[in-house]
Amino acid sequence: MDGEIDLETYTISIIRLNSALEKIDNNEPISDIKEMFHESFIDLNNLYNEIVEDLNHDEVNINEYYLFFSNGKQIFPQYIEILKSIDNEDLDEEITSLMQVFNSLNKIAEPFSTNDMIK
């Protein structure tokens, strides 16, 4: 990933996730929602893995990560709470996967409020 967060993939996955949440509110087909959740999970999980790999390098351009995770400290917990509030057994697997990736991203985001550098 070369020290840069793939913001395009992140944005697309969040838009897809928001669209799926809207489909839940509109009682649209679960199969569509499941697919959208799954695709968002795949993108976010890949992004998480790339970020972890980048942050484990000896030299890290922390500026881009700082902005991403400063914002994430506000956004990630909100998505976790929204996902927790969904009561649909057909979506349990996808919801659990998404919550895990948001929890993982949130763990990385926590130190960014104190200006700590992550290695």
Image: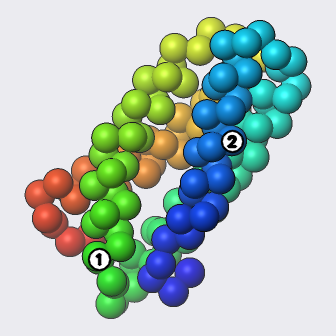
Q: Are marks 1 and 2 in contact (CB under 8 Å)?
A: no
Quarter of the figure with residue 78: top left
* Residue 116 at x, y percent in the picture: 15, 66
The amino acid at mark 2 is Arg
Helix, strand or loop status at disc 2:
helix
The amino acid at mark 1 is Ile
* Residue 52 at x, y percent in the picture: 46, 68
Quarter of the figure with residue 83: top right
Residue 35's disc is: none
Cα distance between the residues tagged 1 and 2: 27 Å
Residue 16's disc is: 2
- Furthest residue to the bottom? 59
Image quadrant in which the C terminus is located:
bottom left
| In the image, residue 119 above or below residue 89 | below
Residue 62's disc is: 1
- What residue lies at 85% left-to-right and 29% top-to-bottom? 32
- Furthest residue to the left? 114
The front one of 20 and 100 is: 20
- What residue lies at 33% left-to-right and 57% top-to-bottom? 69
Indicate left or right for 63 with 79 as reference.
left
Image quadrant in which the N terminus is located:
bottom right
Quarter of the figure with residue 108: bottom left
| In the image, residue 91 above or below residue 13 | above
How crowded pointer 2 is (Cα within 10 Å; few <14, some 14-19, many 20+) is rated as: some
How crowded pointer 1 is (Cα within 10 Å; few <14, some 14-19, many 20+) is rated as: some
Mark found first going from the N terminus, 1 or 2: 2
| In the image, residue 102 above or below residue 114 | above
Question: Which is closer to the viewer, label 1 or label 2?
Answer: 2
Helix, strand or loop status at disc 1:
helix
Indicate left or right for 117 with 30 as reference.
left
Residue 75 in view in this figure: yes
Indicate left or right for 21 with 51 as reference.
right
